[in-house]
Amino acid sequence: MPRSVLDYNIAASADDKGGVGLKTAIVTGGAGFIGSHLVDRLVQQELHVVVLDNLATGSWDNLSQHGPDAVTRIQADVSEPWPQEALPSSADLVFHLASPASPVHYRRLAVETLMVNSMGTKRALDAALSYGARFILASTSEAYGDPAVSPQPETYWGNVNPVGPRSCYDESKRFGEALTMEYVRKHQLDARILRFFNCYGPRMQSEDGRVVPNFVRQALSGDPLTIYGSGEQTRSFCYVSDEVDGIWRAAITDGLAGEIINIGNPEERTILNFAEVVADVAGISLHVEPRPLPPDDPTNRCPDISKARALLGWEPRVPLKDGLEATFRYFRTANHR
């Protein structure tokens, strides 16, 4: 009998013996896609979670399963001064996930993206410093740009256009990493930097422009799947429960101050192959619509997760088809067509 995504989540939870003594976590961007799943995990670990989100790309609906005893919701732009009267008196963990993350959103909110990954990162770092909390920065595989090395190890410096249409996201994330490292060096802050690779699953927005919601929405609507360029460019896809398990392990593991760790799935696929898998899961014949490749779109994306395996004992568990089936179920029940 095939395993469900829930089976993999239960197995991951059974392996988890960390987090003892942690009481409160702050999550910026906690009403977004990955952020809300992280909040679920933190609540499962019996932490009280304080979420700061301006709802530019997130929604409180993503946290509707949690009452005020579990999650405190604060609508705020984390690039601006934080509302001190609403913040907890103490915190053990500060996760900085606030930022638009899809090309559609970060082009629409280009300046805001630059600010949340610069001033927003500084305010999150200052909060962690004032609490004496451990800090976890959500960075991105886009720090590698269009890489000349594959798979991409954390030691690779990247190949990024500093003034291109993607630079509002790529370069602000790289700045956030640099700022975080200075807090480690100057203030001895216990901070870790996680570079997320393509993550997918329930609660993605159907119109955010990324390949998974694009393909799923098009498959459900009976439209051709949009292929940019030749379709030979590669990506790797990590289901959100695996991603969150990596984030949690990075947060609770001691001795990682200043470490940069890739969190993603090392199974590399061409976009054409991914389209074939989506069509198979949807039970449809594959029809594609070719379009020009956007500027600075990476030709390959594949994480080297040797550090995550060695330092966190982590690697993805959920097979692509299982994750896609769960994603299709969400889009169907949410009427995202």
Image (cartoon, grey):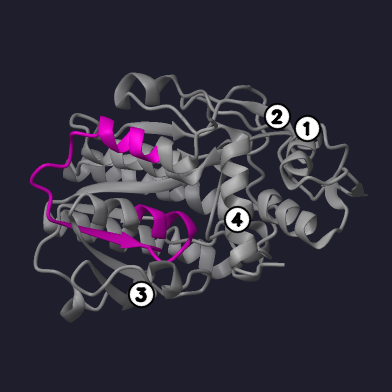
The secondary element bearing badge 4 is classed as: helix
> Which residue is labeled 4 in the image?
329
Which region of the structure is painted magenta? Answer: 9-38
- Above or below, 164 against 237 in this view is below
Residue under label 3: 80
Label 1, label 4: how many angstroms apart (C-alpha)? Answer: 21 Å
Quadrant, the C terminus: bottom right
Q: Amino acid at mark 4?
A: Arg
* Sequence-first disc among 1 and 4: 1
Identify whether 150 is placed above or below 204.
Answer: above
Q: Hey, what amino acid is under mark 1?
A: Asn
Residue occupied by mark 1: 273
Q: Amino acid at mark 2?
A: Arg
Dot 4 or dot 2: first in sequence order is 2
Q: Quadrant of residue 91?
A: bottom left
State the mark number for residue 269.
2
